[in-house]
Amino acid sequence: MDNHQQQKNLARSSTFADDELELVMELSEKDNLYEKKKKLLEVMGFNIEGKVMIKRTGSAELASSVLEEMLQRARIINSDEVDLYFGGIDSFRSVGLCSPKLELESLHSILSLVEKSTSNGQQIQSEVLQHIRNATIDMIHEFGNHIKEDVKVIDNWNLDNEKCLLQWGANNGVKTRLDVAYIEGAGRGAIAKEDLDVGDIAIEIPVSVIISEDLVCKTSMFPVLEKVDGISSETMLLLWSMKEKHDSNSIYKFYFDSLPKAFNTGLSFGIEAVMTLDGTLLLEEIVQAKEHLRSQYDGLIPSLCKDYPDIFPPEIYTWDEFLWACELWYSNSMKVMFSDGKLRTCLIPIAGFLNHSISPHIMNYGRVDITTDSLKFPLSRPCKTGEQCYLSYGNLSSSHLITFYGFLPKGDNPHDVIPLDIDLSEVDSTEDTCLMSNWSTHMVRGTWLANNHGIFNYGLPPPLLEHLRQARGLTLQSNVQERLEVDLEVLEDLHSTFDAMMQNLSVAEPSDREKFDWDVKLALDFKDLQRRIISSIIS
């Protein structure tokens, strides 16, 4: 979840001439999608070095023009595989056609570059840079203004343990401008106690209260665990947390007391919920994950309890306790880059109250501030008093969020894709004119997310259509009639494929869902989402 290295690779600046400034938005050659991004930048007419030349003095209109070019570059550089696959050139050129998180990331990469430039004494007088900065901030505010959410706080919900944790945090140096509340439809969440603007620090956590692998090294279990072949630091921490939650003298007692008795993730789905998922890929994902955890438990814990019962008491190290600990770490852990340069998987007390959103308030976190020896959570967009403050857990699909976090995100998740099993050996195109050719995998998502539903596009991903056309011998020299005939074949095949998928999902559903347990309801909601995606493609 750490975006700082990406920002470092993305943005740098240097003086070019007395009356000019050279800004560089660099595409890192270490980027896994470097070739595709490079090709897209070339097609859009941008130099690969990422140089943007601007005058030190100039009007707001000039700044607006420069900002537009920088934003188009930034969208491409910040894109992940899904963004690129479904994007198309028009998406990267137009405001509002990219995913919300990508748009916010792109704006912040520009802001980071400009603020780095203006912090240099020789460049702070640049009028254009100031105009660009102001315009970027305005766009971030406008972005936030389009996101509306009604937050209904349930006042009579017992949050005594959570309040005790907040007080414990304050006593140990935690600074927060957020409060905890129980929100209808979301459970626990973090609410802004005051108006927060871009760059404000919502939470600051001292390293001293972060739960990391260093804690395990100081325990009696470490000499035993370090001799276990292939055991990871994450597994050690998981075993530590199973025991620590029962220690009434633990310094983290208030943290463990604040945690749910059950996390209600897909890993805890009962047999009825699992059966409900029949016909979906989520079924396979959950079954495989549970089988992996069961295998891990059986291969490790019984022998530890047998050989070292004083260190690993059998009554504590049960399967149910193990599953609870797994759900804790899957749903609450964060990757943190410490001042020694090592990336560690950690639990962050109080920060765990932050829920996920596809349009988050906080994105750039995960690196310890060396000067304060703390982890800071700065706002990427404003959050007003009483609003729920959201974090980004990453670019995750709803199936992943259900399996490991236990919820479906609100809004249209651009990463809700359905992978397709297509024989890629039929086509091996390397033509430069085929902008997005040679993808190793193909996929679809809800066509309502597409910006082009016209002829030859249909709201479907361009790489998929291009691949299926080439498989039928269509070339750039083909005339319109030939293209139409091939497209008809392509669409008929797609219709047949997805109609079969829909049939697999079209079993009788109960009319009254309220009588079902949480897991069956969540399974039914996911199935509805899958039907909606497939129905849009069939239509």
Image (tube, rainbow, N blue to C red):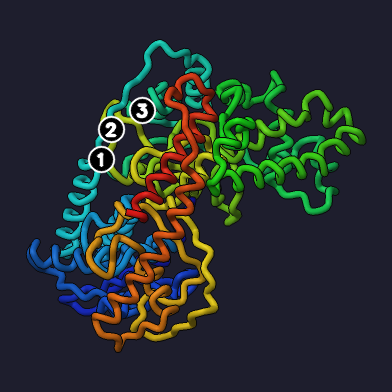
Residue 38 image point, x, y percent: 38, 77
Distance CA(mark 3)–CA(mark 2) = 13 Å
From the image, tell me which residue sits under label 1: 147
Badge number at residue 149 = 2
Q: Is 457 above or below relative to 159? A: below
Contact between marks 2 and 1 (CB within 8 A): the answer is: yes
Mark 3 or mark 1, earlier in chain:
1
Residue 11 image point, x, y percent: 35, 66
Quadrant where the image shows the C terminus: bottom left
Distance CA(mark 2)–CA(mark 1) = 7 Å
> Is 20 left, or right, of 120 in this rendering?
left
Q: What residue is rendered at 77% in x and 49% in y?
A: 231
Circle 3: residue type: Ile
Circle 2: residue type: Glu
Badge number at residue 407 = none
In front: 450, or 157? 450
Circle 1: residue type: Ile
How crowded pointer 2 is (Cα within 10 Å; few <14, some 14-19, many 20+) is rated as few
